[in-house]
Image (cartoon, helix red, strand yellow):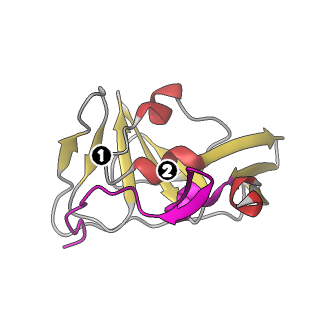
């Protein structure tokens, strides 16, 4: 249970970190209930629209783009609105990823067990939120 609360951290080089988001057809977005955010429903990637920008979480790191198809670049900050995603959303696990520090060359990301769907409740490590998430990929 203690290990579930200790962040796993990694330092990524801005010049080397890459992601290529693919969709089944043109990107389609659905609102995230209780927020002003929306998420892509026809991709296996976690893509979230925040205003005029798009964020994707890939392997525990955040990337940003001005279009849903990219190009994507590693980001050293994310909007606080991303942390308001409720447990009822299939993107809730992304709220467990944090940017810990950054420089001109690299970014330090970290995540706790919630990113892998492990949650501490009643002094027990449980897997899953109890919500049903329909299959999101095409």
Residue 50: percent from the left, percent from the top? Answer: 38, 32
Residue 9: percent from the left, percent from the top? Answer: 78, 58
Question: Callout 1: few (<14), some (14-19), or many (20+) C-alpha neighbours within 10 Å?
Answer: some
- Whether 121 is among the magenta residues is yes
Alpha-carbon distance for marks 2 and 1? 13 Å
| 129 with respect to 96 (left or right) | left
Q: Which residues are magenta?
A: 111-138
Q: Which residue is mark 2?
A: 94
Q: Nearer the viewer, residue 110 or 65?
A: 110
Q: Nearer the viewer, residue 71 or 93?
A: 93
Q: Secondary structure at mark 1?
A: loop
* Residue 133 versus residue 86 in the image, above or below: below
Mark 2 or mark 1: whose residue is earlier in sequence? 1
**Quarter placement of the C terminus:** bottom left
| 64 with respect to 130 (left or right) | right
Q: Secondary structure at mark 2?
A: helix
Residue 119: percent from the left, percent from the top? Answer: 54, 56
User: Which one is in front in this view, the residue at disc 2 or the one at disc 1?
Assistant: 1
- Whether 77 is among the magenta residues is no
Question: Which residue appears at 33% of the width and 57% of the height?
Answer: 130
Q: Nearer the viewer, residue 132 or 66?
A: 132
Are dots 2 and 1 in contact, CB under 8 Å? no
* Residue 51 versus residue 116 in the image, above or below: above
Q: Which mark is residue 88?
A: 1
Q: Kindly indicate the quadrant of the structure image that contains residue 35.
A: top left
């Amino acid at each position: 249970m203690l290990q579930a609360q200790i962040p796993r951290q990694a330092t990524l080089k801005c010049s080397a970190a890459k992601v290529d988001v693919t969709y089944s057809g043109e990107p389609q977005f659905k609102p995230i209930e209780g927020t002003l955010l929306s998420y892509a429903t026809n991709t296996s990637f976690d893509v979230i629209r925040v205003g005029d920008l798009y964020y994707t979480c890939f392997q525990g790191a955040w990337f940003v783009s001005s279009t849903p198809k990219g190009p994507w670049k590693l980001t050293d900050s994310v909007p606080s609105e991303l942390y308001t995603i409720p447990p009822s959303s299939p993107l809730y696990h992304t709220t467990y990823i944090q940017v810990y520090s950054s420089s001109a060359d690299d970014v330090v990301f970290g995540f706790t067990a919630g990113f892998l769907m492990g949650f501490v409740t009643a002094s027990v490590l449980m897997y899953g939120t109890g919500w049903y998430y329909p299959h999101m990929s095409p």
